[in-house]
Image (tube, helix red, strand yellow):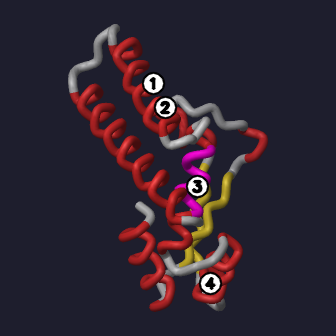
Amino acid sequence: MNQVMRLKVLKGRKAVDAYREAHRQLYSKPWHRGIPEEHTPLLNILLGGLKEQDFNSLAEFFGASEELNIQELGFNSRSELRAEIDRLNQGAEYSVILLYASDFEWSGVEVSREDEPFELRIPIDTPGARTLREALKQKWI
């Protein structure tokens, strides 16, 4: 990623951070009927800030931001990062969690029951996985 694009992504991240803070403040108040109408301008401000950086959609911005995340972690591509994660997790034991559609009911997310149970495999800690996880927390999250 060239320096100009890097700066655009960094400015876009500031716009996302400002949106998240305004969103947090809006939803910290008790719910009222006007919340949806108050939320729309916040989203429009975010989209306008991203447009100023030449991003035409949230997806386009988050794709560029992810590319920068990978570079900030010292990798050249997503596949290189994936290969390193796989290497670190090689031979690791996994903890398996089964999730059901009913687990998502509280969130309002509609999940097809045809695919249940969902299997979530989490590697049990290895020294390399912990190191990578710490790097991700510092740079990515």
Q: Element type at marker 4?
A: helix
Identify which amino acid the numbered label 1 is placed on.
Asn
The answer to whether 16 appears left or right of 6 in the picture is left
Structural distance between the alpha carbons of marks 3 and 1: 20 Å
Say what secondary structure mark 3 lies in: helix
Q: Amino acid at mark 4?
A: Glu
Q: Can you tell which mark lies on residue 44?
A: 1
Residue labelled with disc 4 = 84
Is any part of residue 48 visible from this angle? yes
Q: Nearer the viewer, residue 12 or 100?
A: 12
Q: Earlier in the sequence, mark 1 or mark 4?
A: 1
Mark 4 vs mark 2: give the one in front.
Answer: 2
| Residue identifier under label 3 | 64
Q: Are marks 2 and 1 in contact (CB under 8 Å)?
A: yes
Q: CA gap, disc 4 to disc 3? A: 21 Å
In the rendered image, residue 109, in percent from the top left (x then y), is placed at 57, 33
Query: What residue is disc 2 on?
Result: 47
Q: Earlier in the sequence, mark 4 or mark 3?
A: 3
